[in-house]
Each structure stands twice: as structure tokens, then as C-alpha cells.
Amino acid sequence: MNRLNRTFAAIALTSLIAQPLLAEPADIEARDRTVDRWLDAELDGLVDLYEHLHANPELSLEEEETAKRMAKELRAAGYRVTTAVGGHGVVGVLENGKGKTVLIRGDMDALPVTEETGVPYASRVEVTQQDGRRTGVMHACGHDVHMVSLVGTARLLSEHRDLWSGTVVAIAQPAEELGRGALAMINAGLFERFPRPDYTISLHVESGLAAGEVGYTSGYSHANVDSVEIKIYGRGGHGARPHTTSDPITTAAYFVTQLQTIVSRRVDPLDPAVITVGSFHGGHKSNVIPNEVDLALTVRSYSDESRELLLDSIRQIAEDTCKTFKCPRPPDVVPRDRYTPAVYANPELVARGVRIFERILGKERVIERRPSMGGEDFGRYARVLEVPGFMFRLGSVSREAIEESRRPGGTPLPSLHSSLYAPVPEPTLRTGVAGMSHLVIDLLAR
């Protein structure tokens, strides 16, 4: 058993040992009614906050005003708040007697997308990019839903401290879209300056689930994400005299085709892996062979072992290809140092969450989802702490839209990061706050 598997086995055992005694059915029913009544009274205010955040998005590393609003909301809920943790990160701590500590997270950054949803509270924010072009800014990945779900959960827990005992650490995280925010907050002393969590909980909207539904994945739910930049050196010259050159475009083209053998012939077929060349740049004129070619790759995997195999193989094939084509010097192969690690959903914690979701929503609204090769830096928290973590999926679109998309010739559902993605606020937020609050209360039940 390797180190990572031993770690996850220990986490599973910890989760089993840490489960509290089951509450009496009457207690659970009373708890459910309390949460429902709170949501009935507070949902309109949460929708107002959602519309404000949606209309005023900020890009990664620029979440200054968003962070101020999140700090204000957490302070008003009675949390001890610290700002500027790892950039614009916000940490709120609420201590309520003895017990475990649970971390809940919402991410704050938006995307450089011009909104086309047509909703009354649509973003009209624009920024100038480095190339001088103007672009809109939009919460096209649902981080506004995530933030309001965090605030709603934080407020509910504060107003009903009789339901739980322990500590809640609520964090508003910057720069998730860059895969840098979680690491920045950890490096800024998140787990030294504040109570150390025993569990990490989060949620993420899903554009293929109806509002009022939740999804879950046990085990790996999101992939390791590496970016690799490669420069292949040649010796340029006239396009009519290729024999006098060392053509880096031919070399790079051969290298790209050989990359495909890594996943198909070196990785276990049952172990998911992806290598995609997303950028290939070389030359400026049809009759000039350039001196160099630049490539940019995204590399996806789940396990540490597969990640190491992929990165080592990319380097080996790049170097050997350049030798074969007699390049004047070895290639530069540079993996980005701040990769995003895989998100692992602790199976025991997931099973616990599923039981809670089925109780409050009904079994038909709790749906198992396939793992994704997308990335999410939420996994860093549980990985660093070596504690159970769980990010569940939150349905966000109308059932009518889903049914329409399934008809022959129907309108496809906008994906996350689309300029047309528009969550249905009321049922989405109600389900997000209810799901996260019930899970935290169960973990910290008196």
C-alpha cells in the first residue's frame, strides 16, 4: 500500500471513529423544522445578496470589494474575522464549546466572460486585458452561489448554536480559477493561525443538475491538473532548403503524435489520464523555417503515481524526439510548480452526507455523479490536513430547461464558464444552504 493510499485509509478510519451517537428521530425532525423555518424567513435576503455579488464580479487576485462584503457578512453573523489571508482571503471563526472543527469554503473569483444571460441583475463589469481588448467579467462558474451558500450556512449555524458544539471555520477563498487561492491561504498560515479542521466541506454548482438536486462522487471527484510548457529548439532557414536546417516544427509535430502513446500504452487502462496540447506556436511566414517552437500542455490524472508517470514520460519523449531529429540543443520542459492536486471525497463522509441529503431532499433528488477530469483546488485542504473532505454538487438549472435539452433538436444546456449560464437562485440557494448546514450540524451534533 503506497503512502497516499495509507493516508486515505487512515482518513476513512478516522471518519468512522469520529461519528457521534445517532440522534433520536424526534430530535432530527425538530432540527429539520428549525432549518426549514430559518430558510423560509431568510431566503429573500440571501437572494438579494446573490444578485449583488452576481452583478459585481471581480477577477482572480482582484477580489478586493468581494472580500470586504464577505468579511462584513461574517462579522454580522458573529464570527471572528481576519482578512488578507493569502491575498484577499477571508477567514471567519465561530467557537461554540467543545467538539470537532469543520472548515466550510466558498470561492470568490469570477471569469473574463461577457455575460449574455439577460437576467435583470446581469454583470456589466468590463476590464481591459493585457492586449488592450475589453472583456466582460462574469460569475460564469457559480462562485456567487458558493459565497451565498457559505454566508447562509454561517448565519444559520450562528443563530442556532443550540444544535451543535465545536468550531466552524468559514473561509472565502480567492483565485480558485487559477488554482492558486487554496495554496496561498495555506502558505499564509491558515492551519497555524486558526483552529485546525477535522473535516473540510464545500459545494460546487453543476449545470447539468436541476435546482433542488444534489450530486455526489465517492473517492476521486476531480483530477490533478498540471500545466507543462515546452520549447523545442531548431536551426532555422529557407523553406525551400529544409535539408540545411533542423526543423523544429517537424520535430514538434512528431512529438505531439508520440505524446498520445503515453496514455494509450504506458498508463493502466483503468486509471484515467489526459494529455492535451492546447497551444502550438512556431514561425511567422510560410517560406521560413523558424528557430524554435513553443508548446503548452494540460495534463490530468488522479493518483500521485499516474501524475509522476505522465510528467516523466513527457520529458523523456521530448528529449528523445529532439535527439532523433538532431536538434541543436535539448528541449526545455517546464511543469508549472503550482499544480492543482486531485480532490478526494472521503467515502465514509460521502456516505454520511448522502444519508442526510436523502432525508432532507428525498432519495430521487440525490444523484451519484461520475468523476470529472476538471480541476478544483479545494482538495488541497483535506490533503494537507490528512482529514476527510467532501465537495458535493449543487443542481442549479430549471427542470424545464433540462427537459427541453433532452428533446430532439432541443436547446442545449449552457455549461459552466458559458456566457449563458444562469442558475435559478431561490431553489439553488435553499438547497445549498440546507445541504451544507445539515452536514455541518450532523458532524458537530451535541
Image: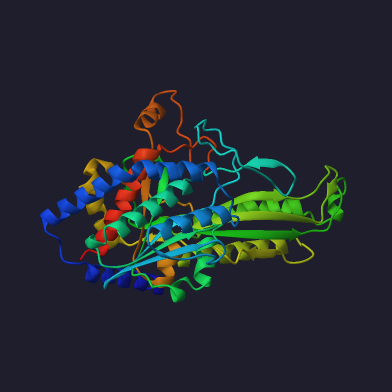
Q: Is residue 122 left or right of residue 75?
A: right
Measuring 65% from the left and 64% from the top, which residue is drawn there? 334
**Vertical order, 409 against 218 (above or below):** above
Q: Position of residue 335 (x, y in %)?
A: 61, 64
Question: What's the image's color scheme?
Answer: rainbow
**Vertical order, 10 against 201 (above or below):** below
In this view of the protein, which residue sits in the foreground, 255 or 123? 123
Quarter of the C terminus within the rendering: bottom left
Quarter of the N terminus within the rendering: bottom left
Q: Is residue 376 visible?
A: no
Q: Position of residue 35 (x, y in %)?
A: 25, 50
Measuring 82% from the left and 56% from the top, which residue is drawn there? 291
Q: Is residue 242 left or right of residue 28?
A: right
In this view of the protein, which residue sits in the foreground, 157 or 436? 157
In which quadrant of the rendered view does residue 209 lie? top left
Q: Is residue 350 left or right of residue 280?
A: left
Q: Position of residue 128 (x, y in %)?
A: 70, 45
Measuring 40% from the left and 42% from the top, which residue is drawn there? 47
Q: How many numbered marks appear?
A: 0
In this view of the protein, which residue sits in the foreground, 12 or 246? 12
Q: Is residue 313 visible?
A: yes
Q: Is residue 141 left or right of residue 38?
A: right
In this view of the protein, which residue sits in the foreground, 71 or 338? 71
Q: Position of residue 93 (x, y in %)?
A: 39, 66
- Which residue is farthest bottom? 192
